[in-house]
Amino acid sequence: MKRSEVKEYNGKNGKPAYIIFDNKIYDVTESKLWKDGIHMNRHKAGEDMTDFISMAPHGENLLERDNIRFVGNLEEDKQKEDKKLKYRRLYSKLHPHPIFIHFPMGILYFGAFMLLLYLFTGNVNFENASYYALIVGTVSIFPAVVTGFISWWLNYEMTMTNVFKNKIVFSSILIVISLTLVIIRSYYLPPYSMNYIVKVIYIGGYFLCIPTLSFVAYNGGKITWPS
């Protein structure tokens, strides 16, 4: 069976649902994970799932169970050369974006907690810790954003959906807020030299980073686990 023929088996209108993995064809019609030819509200039957299954947490061993049946080998046909394939496979092995995104999350959450302790205790050491965390957290945003764009380009052809739009817009907002906070806090040394208005802006902006960052992470989760 050729690739173009597999596309017809999409699980619609009573047709079986086939997928391709590693030049092999599998029937996923009876799988509870492929209801009506759709998996996780994202992947559709009839397509080549090689790259996606390689990146998925379950791996190819799932094809040996869950009522999935091997149909046959894919017939060779002329395909347009995928110039991104080697980069996509390298990315799937290294997973740079999921690695880098955890740094600003953990560091800025920690910094906000230190700032909260400072407000409750008045201990300036907590405030200093929040300042250093802000600097490191702000710097760590940039590799997370860069690898996010690389992932978007390699795996999703830079298709603009609401999820990606939210990630781009709120990541940009996070960068602006965090950079502004670093500038403000670096200008006012020591921190108690801030006047009341500046202090409110600084503290409010710091805590605003948390829901902003969380919303970016939430939309990232929607890509991995669509609802």
Image (cartoon, rainbow, N blue to C red):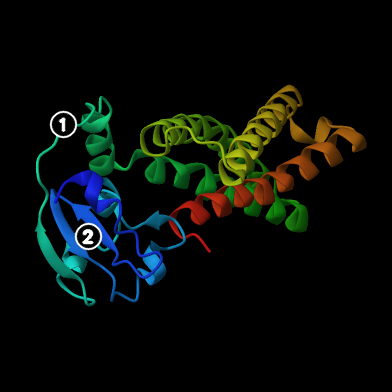
Q: Secondary structure at mark 2?
A: loop
Q: Are marks 1 and 2 in contact (CB under 8 Å)?
A: no
Image position of 227 (left or right of 100): right
In the picture, residue 133 is in which quadrant?
top right
Q: Is residue 160 above or below residue 162?
A: above
Residue name at image x 64 percent, y 54 percent: 113
Residue ID at (86%, 33%):
198
Label 2 is placed on what type of residue?
Answer: Gly
Q: CA distance from mark 1 to mark 2?
A: 27 Å
**Total number of numbered discs in the rendering:** 2
Residue 94 versus residue 58 in the image, above or below: above
Please tell me which residue is depicted at 16% across the width and 46% down the height of the picture.
Answer: 2
Residue 175 screen position, x and y as percent: 63, 31
Seen in the picture, residue 37 relative to 103 is either above or below; the reply is below
Q: Amino acid at mark 1?
A: Lys
In this rendered view, identify the residue nearer to me: 122 or 37: 37
Residue 160: percent from the left, percent from the top? Answer: 56, 36
Label whose residue precedes the other's in the sequence (1 or 2): 2
The residue where tag 2 is placed is 59
Point 40% across, 40% down: residue = 97
Label 1: how many Cα within 10 Å (few below 14, some 14–19, many 20+): few
Instruction: Say which residue label 1 marks.
Output: 78
Report helix, strand or loop for mark 1: loop
Front residue of 124/227: it is 227
Is 225 positioned to the left or the right of 119 in the image? left
**Residue 173 location, x and y as percent?**
69, 34
- Relative depth, front residue between 99 and 157: 157
Comparing marks 1 and 2, which lies closer to the viewer? 1
Q: Is residue 207 above or below residue 225?
A: above
Within the image, what quadrant is residue 132 found in?
top right
